[in-house]
Amino acid sequence: MIESYAFSAAFAVQILAMSVLLPRRLIRYCRAWPAAYPDSFEKMYPGIGHEVALDRYALSMRRFGTLYLGANLLIAALGVLVLVWLFQQMQTTGWDEKFVVFRTLAYFLLQTVPLLILAVWGVWYMRKHNLSMPEPKRKASLQRRGLFDFVSPSAVAVSVLAYVLFVAFVIYLWQRQISGRDALVWTGIITFVYALDGFSLYKKLYGKKNRLEPQEGRADRMALGVKMTVYINITVVAFFFIMLAVTQLEMRNWMPCALSTFFVIITFFISRAVAMPRKAEAHGIGPRSEVPS
């Protein structure tokens, strides 16, 4: 069965990308933050000296990073067992694609748990130091913060076109084989996704500024966040299109492979959001420093 081999390849990449490569990239990014934005880092530790501040931050990263990477390696090992198990299930006659799809989804949710914990830890860490700082005087910024300052018009046009094509495809299926209720549900889902992403873009462009974050750092983060939102939007539409087409064309056995491939693409865009700052690379933060020692 070619579907089982294609799914196995996609699931193996999912394990490697989400539970091995992405965690190391995230830790590398966190370790590089003081070198990338030294002014903000100094504000987090006022009056104790730069070297002492670096030691404290490094200690926190070493403790948390070791646990974070260890948890992800355990999840990766579990993923190998899940892959073998699901591959064996797919070799049986009359295997149920829903069985594999639900377990693939459950495993991806498990993979996101350490990522969510890292996000919560980051918010707690920043808030802990943010509360100890005096409120700075607000300064007006004359920099533009429009959507097209961070993402190309062609990417936005592709996103809009993807929405139009998906709705047109749903209408086409409605006229031939799906019910009006199903057509309304699919249209409502994709519309909700676009509305949610639109709100997310607005918050990224015009949301409240973090006092610890310099203007340059905020611009870098906004650019990455806006691009990731637009690209993931396109990916979600493509995934829905594929899943709907596979379902209606009686190719359900390809659903597990399509789902796992979608998770890989999502992981890729997350990794783009934590690209190594150029300032950090200039200070010697490289691949060898990505794992806490």
Image (spheres, rainbow, N blue to C red):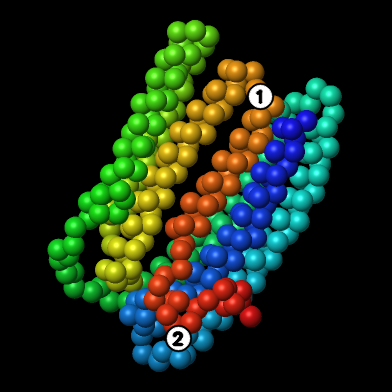
Q: Is residue 231 left or right of residue 10?
A: left
Q: In this view of the protein, which residue sits in the foreground, 291 or 122? A: 291
Q: Residue at x 18, y 69 (%)?
A: 138
- Identify the residue at image location x=80%, y=49%: 81
Residue 30's x, y, as percent? Answer: 49, 71
Figure quadrant of the N terminus: top right
* Drawn side of residue 188 relative to residue 135, left or right: right
Query: In the picture, which quadrant includes the C terminus?
Result: bottom right
- Is 291 rendered above or below residue 256? below
Q: Residues within 10 Å of mark 2 (few under 14, many from 20)?
A: some
- 226 horizontally vs 3: left or right: left
Disc 2 to disc 1, C-alpha distance: 55 Å
Residue 149 screen position, x and y as percent? 25, 54
State the residue position of label 1: 252
**Label 1 secondary element:** helix
Residue 42 coordinates in the image, percent (x, y): 36, 83
Residue 60 visible in this rendered orientation of the protein: no
Q: Amino acid at mark 2?
A: Ala
* Residue at figure coordinates x 48%, y 51% from the top left: 269
Numbered mark located on residue 30 in the image: none
Query: Which residue was labeled with disc 2?
Result: 53
Residue 51, compared with residue 11, is above or below; it is: below
For label 2, the SS is helix
First reached walking from the N terminus: tag 2 or tag 1: 2
Amino acid type at mark 1: Arg
Q: Give the total number of marks visible in the rendering.
A: 2
Residue 117: quadrant of the picture: bottom right
Q: Give the x, y percent position of residue 289.
A: 57, 78
Closest to the camera, between mark 2 and mark 1, is 1
Q: Identify which residue, 287 or 100, lies in the foreground.
A: 287
